[in-house]
Amino acid sequence: MNTPNLIIPGFPKSGTSTLFDYLTQYDQVFKPKRKEPHTYTFEDRWNYRDKISGLFVNLYGEENSWRYYPDASTTYMISNDAIPRISQEGKDCRFIVIARDPIDRIVSHYNWLQSLGIATKPFRQEIYENRGVFDEKTKYAGNFKNYLEFSKYGKQFQKLFEHIEKERILILYYEDLSKDPTNVMREIENFLQLPNCDHNHIHSNRTKSPKYFVPFKYQRLLSFIRLRININLARILEVVVRKKYKKYKLNKSDKLWLYNQLKTDIAIQKNLGLIHPKWTTVRSCIELEN
């Protein structure tokens, strides 16, 4: 039975899907049916990882034809348990972590969940009311609302460095992958010792901008009516409950407010050398303070 040996933990809306799709174009990298099994985050999945179908069983196959078996679950960095569990297994896993400007990431995260009908409150209220620490037992259709916590890279990288040798970690940036994917992939090839590959350029999981969205609390009911009662009735009710989607654009006031929420952790990020030159939003806040 094969198990993952290439971990792409990342953060929501930071390019992990695009990176995963680039990586699985290599002949030596297996492409599992599920990009994000979250095996190491949830206790039941961890305890029965070799028994539950869709985790280690059937997910990675029995043949040893590939050099790398990836797991790109975006809860691994924020989870208190995932990284220690990966380390506990004792495998020589490689880690590729891709990060994005922490303030821009929050905005994209909010717009994404709003387009899915999961975030329904005004921007600042939505962020503030979900400022608590990550709890894997609290789920919103599998999409967590810990906007601020997901952007606290400093705390999360500190934990990663405590358990995993830095030689096994490659840190990448969303801004580089978006603008120059070829050079990023050359860096990955050197890190993983993979032969050069001509990639099909892609941008996976881009947030859509629909005209309307259906709030999450109505989605299961509408699905039930659509499948079990009458599809036309479901369409009528959907028009009644849907809301107009308006993509949020960051303003100066909210930018500084977010910066102050993340300020302590951004100082840790700075000390760890994580602040990227292309993180223009967070760097502008740091410059204003100085």
Image: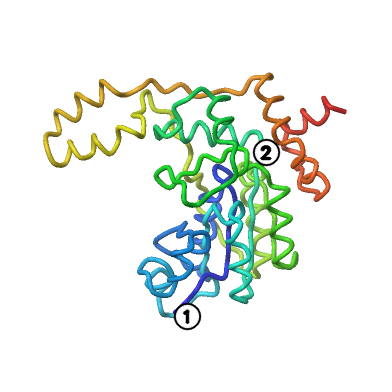
Please name the amino acid that badge 1 sits on: Asn
Query: At 62% across and 42% down in the image, what residue appears?
Result: 149
Labels 1 & 2 near each other (Cβ < 8 A): no
Numbered label tally: 2
Q: Residue at x 64, y 20 (%)?
A: 251
Using the image as rendered, state which of residue 32 and residue 185 is in the foreground.
32
The residue pinned by badge 2 equals: 101
Which residue lies at the image location 30% right of the left edge and 32% below the top edge?
218
Left or right: residue 280 versus residue 69 is right
Give the crowd class for mark 1: few <14, some 14-19, many >=20 residues within 10 Å: few
Q: Residue 162: image x %, image y %?
A: 74, 63
Instruction: Return the x and y of residue 258 as percentages of the image width and height.
Output: 67, 29
Residue visible at 45% across and 60% down in the picture: 37
Front residue of 43 and 142 = 43
**Residue type, numbered disc 2:** Asp
The image quadrant where one finds the C terminus is: top right
- Give the quadrant of residue 198: bottom right
Farthest-out residue, right: 290
Q: Is residue 234 above or below residue 266?
A: above
Residue 87: mark: none
- Quadrant where the image shows the N terminus: bottom left
Q: Please name the residue that numbered disc 1 is placed on.
A: 64
Q: CA distance from mark 1 to mark 2?
A: 38 Å
Mark closest to the chain's N terminus, 1 or 2:
1
Q: What kind of element bears circle 2? A: loop
